[in-house]
Image (cartoon, grey):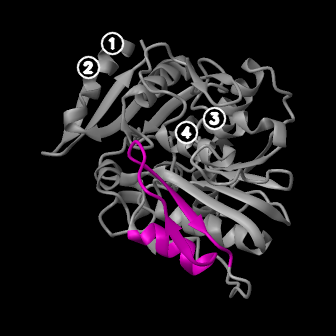
Amino acid sequence: MNRLTTSGAGYELARFPEDPRDPFRAWDAADEYLLRHLEGADGADPVDLSGSVVVVGDRWGALSTVLAGHRPVQITDSYLAQRATAANLERNGADADAVRLLSVRDTPPERIDVLLVRVPKSLALLEDQLYRLAPAVHPGTVVIGTGMVKEIHTSTLKLFERIIGPTRTSLAVKKARLIHCTPDPAPVRAPSPWPHRYELPDDVGAVAGRTVTNHAGIFCAERLDIGTRFFLKHLPVRSGPERVVDLGCGNGVLGLSAALANPEAAVTFIDESYQAVASAEATFRDNIGAAAEARFVVGDGLAGTAPASVDLVLNNPPFHSHQATTDATARNMFHGARAALRQGGELWVVGNRHLGYHTQLRRTFGNCTTVAGDPKFVVLRAVKR
């Protein structure tokens, strides 16, 4: 946990789940820059926050916690960001309802007077959100984006310009920038172009030729990523009634493959991204049908799963948290899988060879077998003894 100090107060903030080994803070220079600008500390007039304030993409709740006195609406694709926000509000003595927590799948407010956008890693997610929020913006709306210099590109500015209105950037401070956007008084309203769909290739086992649905912001929304493609060729062949979890499901192709290969399996799709779970559900329903048994869970990995209740976990863990490279998410997933698996249950993982997941799996499970590998990827199997 670290302390963020503003001109008005100090705030104890942490990411979620809180991990004393985590070297990363719950905010960065881009968040600080935006907060200083809102206060008028950079020489500009303070921003009037008395109206409807919407904070989009607040990564760990730092912006929402500092602005809690203005009762903002937070919109995020991240379940973990929502949990972090709730925890940070509590540890700083704010009311639990001081910030209205919405996901990107929820209906946004009808009117927005101040729109604050933390630029996401995914340009597609930014595009989708700007399209969804544009109808609530009016000529008097103050629109400010923030991000690190490496996160703000010409394409980022063009999105603001095309969807909201004329756009300019600030000078860089501590490698962070602000984006100032003036709403067009006569905007051209258009629906979001998302979701996108594509057909899977012919060499990926049970899901060959199937169509997947991809909402904005999920990993590799325009095509099948090469790690998942390799994994699909080496999935276990199983039969009979069993519980399978597609952990960190993305668009759900791993779980779909398991369901198609074993119609008796009950598959659960889990991801911390609302967009991912919506994609997985659309992919599953379009290919198997509305009545087929499956569960779709937005959550913190397997934290809500009953111990010793799962037979098979399929996992392609992320190794980034926003811009930072970390194995913390993979570690949490592996530990959660071990707790959720029955004795004899199996965790199958695909990962870049250089990440060394075999070491962590041996430490967690006491065993790890390499099922398949190529110069870039490995498929690993760990069994709960």
Task: Answer with the quarter of the image where residue 328 lies.
Answer: top left
Disc on the earlier residue, 4 or 3: 4
Q: Determine whether 197 is above or below 278 in the image.
A: below
Disc on the earlier residue, 3 or 1: 3
Residue 5 lies in the magenta stretch: no
> So how many labels did they put on this image?
4
What's the residue at 60%, 35% (across, down)? 60
Q: Are marks 1 and 2 in contact (CB under 8 Å)?
A: yes
Badge nearest the viewer, 3 or 1: 3
Query: Which residue is tagged 1?
Result: 363
Query: Which residue is tagged 4?
Result: 32
Badge nearest the viewer, 4 or 1: 4
Where residue 199 appears, x then y in whole percent?
A: 43, 73
Where residue 278 appears, x then y in whole percent?
A: 64, 56
Q: Under tag 4, what secondary structure?
A: helix
Query: Which residue is tagged 3?
Result: 62
Disc on the earlier residue, 4 or 1: 4
Where residue 203 appears, x then y in whole percent?
A: 29, 64
User: 235 or 195: nearer the eye?
Assistant: 195
Where residue 97 appears, x then y in whole percent?
A: 87, 35
Q: Under tag 3, what secondary structure?
A: helix
What's the residue at 66%, 63% (across, down)? 143
Horizontal placement of 192 versus 325: left or right?
right
Residue 167 lies in the magenta stretch: yes
Q: Determine whether 319 is above or below 217 in the image.
A: above
The circle drawn on residue 359 is 2
Span shown in magenta: 154-183
